[in-house]
Image (spheres, coloured by chain):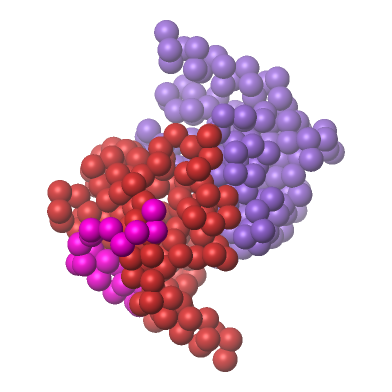
Chain colours: A red, B purple
Amino acid sequence: MGATAKHDEMPMSRAFAEAEGAGTRGEVPVGAALVRDGAVVGVAGTRVEAERDPTAHAEILVLRAAAARLGRRQLDDCDLYVTLEPCPMCAAAIGFARIRRLYFGAYDPKGGGVEHGPRIYDQPTCHHRPEIYGGIAERRAAALLQAFFRKRRS
Amino acid sequence: MGATAKHDEMPMSRAFAEAEGAGTRGEVPVGAALVRDGAVVGVAGTRVEAERDPTAHAEILVLRAAAARLGRRQLDDCDLYVTLEPCPMCAAAIGFARIRRLYFGAYDPKGGGVEHGPRIYDQPTCHHRPEIYGGIAERRAAALLQAFFRKRRS
């Protein structure tokens, strides 16, 4: 937990590209990539504004699309890469989808639900805890968010 | 909190009809109804199995549909009726959607995220807490779930 774990650079690069695309569209710049058998099988960036959907976070979109494509609601052979610590909604969804490993870029003390706030996977009512590798691209992810919120305030 | 609040019987009846329909389809029997200006503007039951979507809980479906129809991601003039205490994923989504009042049937000590587990709205990282009226149809909601799980085990 919190350790810089062995992970592929490529899926996180794809997640960052999605995050940057989301930021360009005026969305909170968060991106996600789903990996199965060593291959990226889905990517998404936030689409809350575009879809007028309060649940359209990158993680939810990539999980829903992959489950639909694979035809099953459990993705227990998949690993998820996200640029930011998932919020409580997404953390719980990741648990329901039985994701095997969760890699995320920056910790999010204000909105995260994995290592902050409700710490979803530490709850006795949580039925699945993925392996968690957080803070693996802390500076890049944090810089992306800071630039976005600085721009939005100006 | 936990008080039997003044609420309309009709939206909860619609939510129960959705829950029963979900149970008939082999889904966990939970239903939801969304109310705006005194009228039910959306209903849904669980569709996790039908859609192969781990996020297709009744609450998520009804929020997404209403936000799409109204063309906005915040539903701050809407009240949500659910047959069961929302899970952490749905509780967080309800917060993102800025739902005004949340009415739910039975408490869910094993999977609930409002009065149990992570208690989403009690977290300092939570930005919106609806008014909450829980346990307003405790016996009916509990009986529905018990019958479902008894049948599934047999």
Above or below for A15 versus A23 = above
Residue furthest front as drawn: A3
Quadrant in the rendering for residue A75:
top left
Majority secondary structure in the magenta region: helix
Against A5, residue A143 (above or below) is: below
Quadrant containing the C terminus of chain A is bottom right
* B99 vs A75: above or below: below
B37 to the left or right of A123: right
Confirm whether the magenta stretch covers residue B126: no
Does any portion of residue A3 appear in the rendered image? yes
Furthest-left residue in this view: A38
A143 in relation to A110, above or below:
below
Quarter of the view holding residue B77: bottom right
> In the rendered image, is residue A31 in sight?
no
Residue B39: image location, x then y, percent: 71, 47
- Residue at x-position 42% and y-position 8%: B154
User: With B144 as the anchor, is A99 left or right in this view?
Assistant: left
Residue at 57%, 50% (x, y): give it. Answer: A118
Which residue is nearer to you in this view: A116 or A83? A116
In this view, the residue in front, B6 or B138, is B138
Q: Which residues are magenta?
A: A1-21
Question: Where residue A39 sits: x, y (%)?
Answer: 15, 56
Q: Nearer the viewer, residue A119 or B35?
A: A119
Residue B90: percent from left, percent from top: 55, 46
Is A15 contained in the magenta span?
yes
Measured as percent of width and height from the top left, residue B145 is found at 56, 21
How many numbered dots are placed on residues in this image? Answer: 0
Q: Which residue is the extreme one toward the top? A: B154
